[in-house]
């Protein structure tokens, strides 16, 4: 995509610097508060990706790319999915059915909490990585080599 | 009369849904078709969510002193469906970008002509 | 211990392989892992089929939640049979893929190709084993999104528009199915298939259920490319990479057809589907239209892949015809043809894949004189063609035999005649290819380097061809399983 | 929404879609679906609109004039809509608490999830535990789309055309 914003615009840079940390904090809040309030891994992943995209738009794609290399994103997305399946397999090997969280910990409730925590985490990971990946895929198409 | 009051919101949703579907079927611009598809899907989501609503119920988060909640199951289904929808949209848009590079056009008729000519 | 988890492992094994392929970024590893996963899935499917034949329905509760609350996997003879054919074709195609893919897909994209292939396989298997209608929708979208990607990975630019068209039709179909599921849920309060079948009779008299039925039928018909809704199919098959054509042609529409069987017979029940709703007549008309329009369109194709694609549309007509009889024989014929058609189309598309591997494309012009240059490939194609026509000793004959028997059993002899006439039409288009390959002089432009395809491609092709003949001669396995599946669907005890 | 059909400026079309999604999200809040509203706002009005804009930046902004118009699509759409409206007549009334879908499975979730899962947000409980396998499917869909886009747009040949 053609960068619509001048990369050296001072106001934007400072505003972005002020905005991005709260957005990231908010993403983490949404991630870990999905059990009690609205939200969860998917929404957190999207918000996290949004913060990152804002960074990339303001400070330039090159800088953002240095942080999130294609390899890292690919690994993160794959690991997220692998984590979900691993949780399922863990309960399978503990003698219960696939994705049965009851057996993940000593006590049933703890197991459920652990299971939900881990799966939400894996959703967040995959979603954030994939969203950033898609953003870069589109953004870098625009920059003709 | 009660039929009207009991169902009017479904009819509105159906109208929106069909407007979206019309855009998908009738329009020739590939991007516009995607927008239409999204409107169609978003309207289906509204249909699902409105069936989960219960008179006097609250959001399905358990709190002390509450006994009537909206039906959480349609919400769950639609959360999944929204994700599926955005995944489809992303893929469709990526295809449009590639088609535009290959044909220098995003109009269905022009692409069709180019395909016939070679 | 592990045997009780087979239903879920069936899906998880390929699903687990997909991220691994992407992580490794190594072509050989991705291929090896995919082949291993597909082979394992095939073994699991075989074990599952054996289990269902022995002990009846297997139910697996995901997450340990008892049935209507959680998601259930429910395997009976019908879906075990579908699982077997899907994994078998997938394994054969993967053996073939190693060489073929290097020619037709950009080398850096190959690990991605295998990852998406595995997702597509997992999606298809997930559709087939699940006992929950919403879970079915989710896995249908996994398989659909991955098949759009697979088609678009081709180097030809027309593949892009084909994938785009497929994406639109497919998504509209999926959304229709979603609406249908929503309406069913609204009336019954459940998503579990078995539970639905128990709770639906109380509300079948309502217009909402009728609408749900209509939406589900139309949505699935888009996915199986039944005649007025088939427009996405010819281009999608014609311009996809050869391996993808073979895989999708042999499996995707078959799984969608299975979904149709599931909804019509297990969920709605025969009496609602065929007595309350006039589906009988609609299906007969559409099936005839598909058989004739598909075959006639196939005769006039120049691109052989497109020819086979139109032939697929015609073959879907046969299967729908089998359903419309709503009898054990008709349904047996439909399920048999599902299995058999997967075998023939898989074999034919793989044979064409060999041609494309050597010549770059497969139009009528390229086929000239190919019988001498690529004897094994063309022999395979000819034998597969015989099976497609329905010559005795091949699987094509068996399924058409049952189809004709089903028609006669109902006393609908004009339909039996129609099946025979449509078979003659398929003789015409198969003959065109064979004539070009064996009785026409090769083009001078062909240099003499055009030789036989490599062994790793010929072996899977011939394996499928031999399967065509094996199951055409020894029918005890297929016919036995298909008829017991048909009896299960109709709820008739043996 | 009719504007979407008539407008030829694609930029405006996409913006209207963003607004539509946002309104849908607001509607979800009034229908007590907070989780869904949150997601729809982030996805429909956020990601989807953003991606559409990116696509427009990569392609064209204005739609070309179309020569032919046909009534067939209108007929198709009208008949589908009519079928749906026909189906609504036997639907339970809007927000009727005694409708069948609120009993059975949903009732079980509301009554027992605190004891069985122990998470106050029922949507999270159903999403990740009761129907956790669907959510695995959902992650897979996202993953598929991600590598699909990567496969289509990434990995271009050096210097040449993709």
Image (cartoon, grey):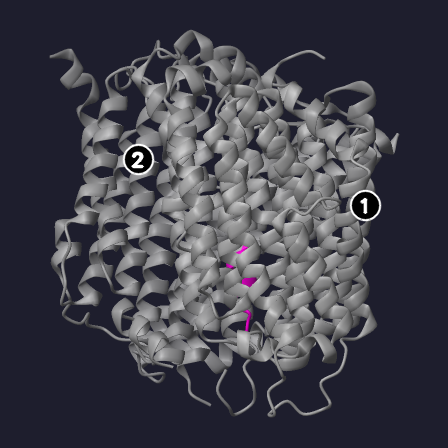
| Tag 1 residue | C470
Write the residue at 20% across / 45% down: B19
Mostly what secondary structure, the magenta segment?
helix
Write the residue at 44% across / 47% down: C292
Compare residues A27 and C127 and report the one nearer the observer. C127
User: In terms of secondary structure, where does tag 1 sit?
Assistant: helix
Q: Are marks 1 and 2 on the same chain?
A: no
Start-end of magenta stretch: C146-154
Name the quadrant of the N terminus of chain C.
Answer: top right
Chain of the residue on which disc 2 is drawn: B
Q: How many marks?
A: 2
Left or right of B112 in this view: A88? right
Q: Position of residue D138 (x, y in %)?
A: 54, 45
Write the residue at 44% across / 43% down: C226
Name the quadrant of the C terminus of chain C.
Answer: top right
Residue C402, compared with residue C200, is above or below; it is below
Q: Position of residue B114 (x, y in %)?
A: 33, 78
Q: Is residue A21 visible?
A: no
Write the residue at 39% across / 17% down: C187
Q: Quadrant of residue D18?
A: bottom left
Q: CA distance from mark 1 to mark 2?
A: 53 Å
In the rendered structure, find residue D66 and report the number of the disc placed on it: none
Left or right of D97 in this view: D132? right
Q: Quadrant of residue B98?
A: bottom left
| Tag 2 residue | B46
Q: Residues within 10 Å of mark 1 (few under 14, many from 20)?
A: some
User: In terms of secondary structure, where does tag 2 sit?
Assistant: helix
């Amino acid at each position: 995509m053609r960068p619509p914003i001048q990369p050296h615009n001072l106001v934007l840079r400072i505003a972005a610097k002020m905005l991005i940390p709260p957005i990231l904090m908010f993403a983490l809040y949404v991630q870990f508060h999905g059990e009690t309030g609205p939200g969860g891994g998917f929404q957190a992943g999207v918000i996290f990706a949004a913060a990152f995209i804002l960074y990339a738009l303001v400070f330039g794609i090159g800088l953002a790319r240095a942080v999130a290399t294609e390899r890292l994103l690919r690994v993160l997305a794959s690991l997220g999915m692998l984590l979900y399946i691993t949780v399922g397999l863990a309960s399978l090997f503990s003698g219960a059915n696939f994705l049965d969280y009851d057996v993940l910990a000593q006590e049933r409730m703890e197991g459920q909490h652990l299971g939900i925590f881990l799966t939400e985490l894996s959703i967040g990971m995959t979603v954030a990585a994939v969203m950033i990946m898609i953003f870069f895929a589109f953004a870098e198409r625009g920059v003709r080599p | 009369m009660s039929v009207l009051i009991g169902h009017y919101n479904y009819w509105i949703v159906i109208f929106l849904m069909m407007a979206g579907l019309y855009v998908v079927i009738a329009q020739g611009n590939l991007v516009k078709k995607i927008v239409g598809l999204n409107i169609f899907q978003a309207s289906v989501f509204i249909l699902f969510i409105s069936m989960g609503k219960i008179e006097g119920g609250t959001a399905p988060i358990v709190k002390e002193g509450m006994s009537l909640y909206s039906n959480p199951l349609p919400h769950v289904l639609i959360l999944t469906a929204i994700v599926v929808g955005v995944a489809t949209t992303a893929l469709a848009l990526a295809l449009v970008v590639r088609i535009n590079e290959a044909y220098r056009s995003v109009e269905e008729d022009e692409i069709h002509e180019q395909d016939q000519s070679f | 211990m592990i045997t009780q988890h087979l239903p879920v492992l069936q899906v998880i094994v390929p699903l687990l392989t997909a991220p691994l392929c992407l992580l490794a970024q190594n072509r050989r590893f991705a291929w090896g892992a995919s082949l291993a996963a597909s082979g394992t899935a095939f073994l699991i499917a075989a074990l599952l089929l054996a289990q269902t034949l022995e002990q009846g329905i297997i139910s697996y509760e995901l997450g340990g939640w008892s049935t209507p609350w959680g998601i259930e996997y429910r395997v009976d003879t019908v879906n075990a049979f579908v699982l077997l054919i899907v994994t078998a074709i997938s394994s054969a195609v993967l053996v073939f893929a190693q060489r073929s893919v290097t020619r037709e897909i950009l080398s850096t994209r190959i690990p991605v190709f295998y990852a998406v292939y595995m997702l597509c396989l997992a999606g298809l298997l997930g559709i087939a084993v699940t006992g929950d209608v919403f879970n079915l929708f989710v896995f249908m979208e996994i398989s659909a999104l991955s098949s759009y990607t697979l088609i678009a990975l081709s180097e030809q630019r027309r593949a892009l528009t084909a994938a785009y068209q497929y994406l639109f039709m497919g998504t509209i179909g999926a959304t229709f199915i979603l609406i249908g599921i929503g309406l069913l849920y609204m009336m019954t309060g459940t998503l579990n298939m078995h539970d639905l079948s128990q709770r639906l009779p109380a509300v079948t008299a309502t217009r909402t259920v009728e609408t749900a039925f209509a939406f589900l039928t139309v949505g699935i018909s888009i996915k199986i490319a039944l005649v007025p809704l088939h427009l996405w199919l010819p281009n999608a098959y014609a311009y996809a990479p050869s391996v993808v054509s073979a895989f999708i042609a042999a499996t995707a529409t078959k799984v969608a057809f299975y979904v149709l069987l599931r909804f019509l017979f297990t969920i709605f029940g025969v009496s609602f589907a065929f007595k309350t709703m006039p589906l009988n007549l609609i299906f007969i008309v559409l099936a005839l239209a598909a058989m004739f329009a598909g075959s006639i369109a196939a005769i006039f194709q120049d691109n052989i892949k497109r020819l086979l694609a139109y032939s697929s549309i015609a073959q879907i007509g046969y299967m729908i015809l089998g359903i419309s009889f709503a009898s054990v024989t008709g349904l047996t014929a439909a399920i048999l043809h599902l299995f058999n058609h997967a075998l023939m189309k898989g074999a034919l598309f793989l044979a064409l894949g060999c041609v494309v591997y050597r010549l770059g494309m497969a139009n009528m012009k390229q086929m000239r004189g190919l019988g001498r240059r690529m004897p094994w490939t063309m022999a395979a194609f000819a034998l597969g063609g015989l099976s497609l026509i329905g010559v005795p000793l091949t699987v094509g004959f068996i399924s058409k035999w049952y189809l004709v028997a089903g028609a006669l059993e109902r006393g609908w002899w004009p339909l039996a005649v129609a099946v025979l006439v449509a078979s003659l039409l398929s003789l015409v288009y198969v003959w065109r290819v064979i004539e070009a390959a064996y009785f026409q002089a090769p083009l001078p432009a062909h240099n003499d380097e055009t030789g036989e395809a490599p062994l790793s491609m010929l072996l899977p092709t011939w394996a499928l061809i031999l399967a065509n003949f094996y199951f055409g001669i020894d029918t005890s396995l297929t016919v036995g399983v298909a008829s017991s599946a048909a009896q299960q669907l109709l709820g008739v005890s043996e | 929404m009719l504007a979407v059909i008539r407008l030829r400026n694609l930029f405006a079309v996409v913006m209207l879609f963003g607004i539509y999604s946002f309104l849908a999200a607001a509607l979800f809040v009034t229908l007590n679906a907070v989780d869904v509203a949150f997601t729809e706002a982030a996805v429909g009005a956020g990601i989807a609109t953003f991606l559409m804009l990116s696509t427009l930046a990569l392609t064209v902004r204005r739609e070309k004039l179309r020569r032919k118009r046909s009534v067939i699509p209108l007929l198709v759409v009208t008949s589908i809509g009519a079928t749906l409206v026909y189906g609504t007549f036997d639907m339970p009334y809007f927000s009727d608490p005694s409708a069948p879908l609120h009993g059975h499975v949903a009732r079980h979730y509301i009554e027992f999830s605190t004891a069985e899962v122990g998470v106050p947000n029922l949507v999270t409980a159903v999403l990740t535990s009761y129907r956790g396998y669907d959510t695995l499917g959902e992650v897979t869909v996202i993953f598929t789309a991600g590598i699909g886009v990567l496969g289509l747009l990434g990995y271009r040949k050096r210097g040449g055309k993709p």
